[in-house]
């Protein structure tokens, strides 16, 4: 047995082979780091947050697969996951999860006490998210909090405070997350209905694309308002325009609610986040 065959299930369990979730978690954290520091974040703090984002996303994937281990084998897109195939046991998954949490905590210990306290709440929300799909049609709202928590942590790490702009940015990111995770759920809707998993895609029904579009619009309007308040340059608004065009393209992909195309729309949100970040970086230039 080769070394790769041994570690391959763990790589797939942590989704190291599919980094889209890491990017979607990273972009708003970078937005916050740049805005909180007026475009000049401390390099060490940035490195800690980038590494922590990778570790916490991996931990989130592990606990998600643990929670879904009895369902993934019944969903076409997730049938090959290590817990669904039996390549790894639930006990092994939990061990990996706790090791990742320890690594994340070691990273956050390099930051101030307020940020450490916030990280504990963030870890709890991230661990609870996968289980909410059993009890509510709004698990995307819980993910919205979990995937936005890097924003207040970024502000406290750099400024030792939580100014109003941190929560404005949090609100914009929250709307964006609910939008793209609804698209993700649209890709699995038929299977989810069969096995009893709940989501906003099921709750929104035939209004799914309309609500996703309104959520994208809400995120963009909030970001534009924040840019105006922060007196960001015109480059920032050009970044928002580019992000808006990607949102429109996603509406085109999802127009017929084809599962594969809805998943492609979800993946396309990486460019939405990237364009906002580019706009922030350029908008903060002197």
Image (cartoon, grey):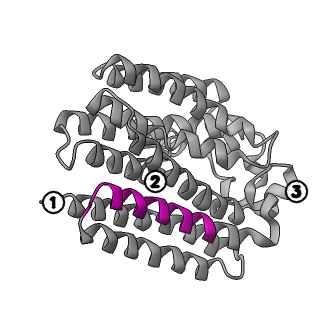
Query: Earlier along the polypeptide chain: callout 2 or callout 1?
Result: 2
Task: Tell which tag, 3 or 2, sits nearer the viewer.
Answer: 2
For label 2, the SS is helix
Foreground pick, 176 / 197: 176
The alpha-carbon separation of the residues under discs 3 and 1 comes to: 51 Å
From the viewer's perspective, is residue 251 above or below residue 42? below
> In the rendered image of this protein, does residue 17 appear above or below residue 235?
above
Disc 1 crowd rating (10 Å Cα; few below 14, some 14-19, many 20+) is: few
Element under disc 3: helix
Q: Are marks 2 and 1 in contact (CB under 8 Å)?
A: no
Q: Earlier in the sequence, mark 3 or mark 2?
A: 2
Disc tally is 3
Q: Is residue 93 left or right of residue 242?
A: right
Position in image of residue 92 (x %, y %): 58, 26
**Relative to the observer, which residue lies in front, 208 or 95?**
208
Q: Could you tell me which residue is drawn at 58 percent across and 26 percent down?
A: 124
- Asked if residue 211 lies left or right of residue 40, the reply is right
Q: Which residue is mark 1?
A: 285
Label 2: few (<14), some (14–19) or many (≥20) C-alpha neighbours in 10 Å? many
Say which residue label 3 marks: 194
Image: 146 above or below 237: above
Task: Give the residue number, with chain letter if any, for mark 2.
Answer: 24
Tell me the quarter of the picture where residue 100 sits: top left
Q: Magenta residues?
A: 213-232
Identify the residue at horizontal 85%, vertical 57% (top origin): 193
**Does residue 37 belong to the magenta stretch?**
no
Instruction: Report the disc number at residue 6.
Output: none
- Residue 162 rendering spot, x and y as whole percentages: 39, 33
Note whether residue 3 is visible: no
Q: Residues within 10 Å of mark 3 (few under 14, many from 20)?
A: few
Tell which tag, 3 or 1, sits nearer the viewer: 1
Q: Going from the N terminus, do you reach mark 3 or mark 1 first?
A: 3
């Amino acid at each position: 047995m080769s070394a790769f065959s041994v570690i391959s299930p763990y790589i797939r369990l942590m989704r190291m082979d599919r980094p889209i979730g890491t990017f979607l978690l990273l972009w708003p954290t970078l937005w916050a780091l740049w805005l909180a520091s007026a475009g000049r974040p401390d390099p060490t703090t940035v490195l800690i947050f980038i590494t922590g984002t990778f570790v916490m996303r991996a931990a989130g994937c592990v606990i998600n697969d643990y929670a879904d281990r009895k369902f993934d084998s019944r969903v076409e897109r997730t049938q090959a996951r290590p817990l669904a195939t039996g390549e790894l046991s639930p006990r092994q998954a939990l061990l990996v999860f706790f090791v990742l949490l320890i690594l994340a905590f070691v990273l956050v210990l390099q930051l101030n006490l307020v940020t450490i306290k916030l990280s504990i709440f963030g870890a709890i929300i991230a661990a609870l998210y996968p289980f909410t799909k059993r009890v509510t049609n709004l698990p995307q709202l819980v993910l919205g909090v979990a995937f936005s928590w890097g924003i207040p942590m970024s502000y406290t790490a750099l400024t030792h405070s939580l100014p109003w702009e941190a929560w404005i940015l949090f609100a914009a990111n929250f709307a964006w997350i609910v939008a793209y995770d609804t698209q993700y759920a649209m890709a699995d809707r038929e299977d989810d209905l069969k096995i009893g998993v709940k989501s906003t895609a099921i709750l929104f029904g035939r209004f799914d694309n309309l609500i996703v579009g309104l959520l994208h619009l809400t995120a963009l309007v909030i970001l534009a308002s924040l840019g105006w308040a922060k007196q960001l340059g015109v480059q920032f608004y050009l970044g928002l325009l580019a992000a808006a065009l990607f949102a429109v393209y996603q509406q085109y992909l999802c127009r017929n609610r084809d599962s594969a195309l809805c998943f492609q729309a979800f993946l396309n949100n990486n460019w939405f986040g990237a364009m906002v970040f580019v706009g922030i970086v350029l908008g903060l230039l002197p």
